[in-house]
Image: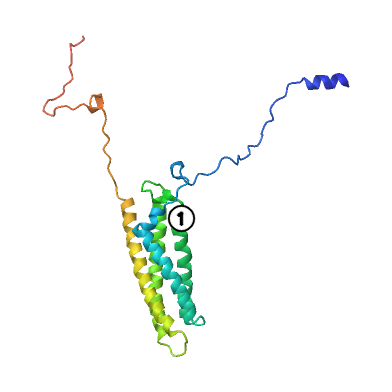
C-alpha cells in the first residue's frame, strides 16, 4: 500500500480537459475613454443645448406644480401633470449624462448619432404633447367649477414656452442628425516619388515594344 502511494505521488499529472473559463472581474466594460476619465463636462452647461435643458427642467417642474394646484380631479390637468413630470425626469437624466459622460459631446464618437436620433424623436413628441396641453389648460381656465383658475392660466403660458423650447431643440437635433449623415470626402496624399503617384503626360501615347520576331 505504501509503495502504491509512493508511485502515485510521482505519477505525471495531466491538465483537465474541458476546464471552464471563468469571467475575470478585472475585465470591465469601458464606458468613459481613458483620456476623459475623472472629468466632468461642466462647460456643457454654458452651451446653447445646456442652457435650453436647464430652462426646460425648471419650466417643466413649475408646470407640474401648477397642474397639481389647478385641479387634480380634472383630466386636462392630469394630462399636463404627467407630461410635465416625465419631462422633468428625462431631461434631468439627459443633462446629467452629458455632464458625467464627456465623450457624448465628441463629434467623432460612433455612438453619438444614435443619441441624436433618440433625442430628436423625444423632443418632437414632447413638442406635440405640450402643444395639446396649452389648449387643455386654456379650456380648464375658462371653467367655472374649478378653484385653481389662475394656476391653469399661468400653466398654459408655461406650456407655450415649453412648446417653443422643445421645437427649438427638435430643429437643433435635426440639423445635427443631417450633419452626421452628410458624406465627407477625404483626400489622402501619398508619396509623390512612389510609382503609384507618378504623373504621365496625356499627350504621349504608350506603345508596347514588339521586339524582334522569333521564327
The image quarter in which residue 170 lies: bottom left
Q: Is residue 197 in sight in this rendering?
A: yes
SS category of the residue bearing label 1? helix
The image quarter in which residue 124 lies: bottom left
| Residue placed furthest toward the bottom | 144
Is residue 70 toward the left or the right of residue 106 in the image?
right
Identity of the residue drawn at 40% across and 62% down: 53
Identity of the residue drawn at 44% across and 45% down: 36
Q: Quadrant of the C terminus?
A: top left
Identity of the residue drawn at 39% across and 57% down: 45
Q: Which residue is mark 1?
A: 97
Q: Is residue 79 in sight in this rendering?
A: no
The picture places residue 91, in percent across and down from the top left corner, at 44, 62
Local crowd at mark 1 within 10 Å, few (<14), some, or many (≥20)?
few
Q: Quadrant of the N terminus?
A: top right
Residue 73 versus residue 181 in the image, above or below = below
The picture places residue 79, in percent across and down from the top left corner, at 46, 76
Identity of the residue drawn at 47% across and 81% down: 70
The total of numbered circles placed on residues is 1
Q: How is the image coloured?
A: rainbow
The picture places residue 151, in percent across and down from the top left corner, at 43, 81
| Residue placed furthest toward the top | 215
| Residue placed furthest toward the left | 203
| Residue placed furthest toward the right | 1
Q: Nearer the viewer, residue 183 or 57?
A: 57
The picture places residue 189, in percent across and down from the top left corner, at 26, 33
Amino acid at each position: 500500500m505504501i509503495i502504491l502511494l509512493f508511485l502515485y505521488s510521482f505519477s505525471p499529472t495531466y491538465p483537465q480537459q474541458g476546464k471552464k473559463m471563468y469571467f475575470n472581474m478585472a475585465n470591465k466594460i469601458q464606458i468613459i475613454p481613458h483620456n476623459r476619465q475623472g472629468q466632468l463636462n461642466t462647460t456643457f452647461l454654458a452651451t446653447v443645448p445646456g442652457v435650453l435643458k436647464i430652462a426646460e427642467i425648471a419650466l417643466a417642474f413649475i408646470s407640474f406644480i401648477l397642474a397639481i394646484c389647478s385641479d387634480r380631479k380634472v383630466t386636462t390637468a392630469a394630462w399636463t401633470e404627467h407630461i410635465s413630470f416625465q419631462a422633468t425626469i428625462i431631461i434631468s437624466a439627459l443633462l446629467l449624462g452629458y455632464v458625467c459622460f464627456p465623450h457624448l459631446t465628441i463629434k467623432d464618437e460612433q455612438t453619438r448619432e444614435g443619441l441624436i436620433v433618440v433625442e430628436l424623436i423625444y423632443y418632437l413628441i414632447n413638442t406635440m404633447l405640450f402643444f395639446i396641453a396649452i389648449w387643455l389648460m386654456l379650456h380648464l381656465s375658462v371653467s367655472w367649477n374649478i378653484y385653481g383658475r389662475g394656476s391653469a392660466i399661468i400653466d398654459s403660458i408655461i406650456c407655450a414656452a415649453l412648446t417653443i423650447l422643445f421645437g427649438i431643440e427638435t430643429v437643433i437635433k435635426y440639423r445635427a442628425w443631417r450633419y452626421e449623415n452628410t458624406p465627407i470626402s477625404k483626400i489622402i496624399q501619398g508619396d509623390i516619388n512612389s510609382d503609384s503617384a507618378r504623373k504621365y503626360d496625356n499627350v504621349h501615347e504608350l506603345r508596347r515594344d514588339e521586339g524582334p520576331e522569333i521564327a
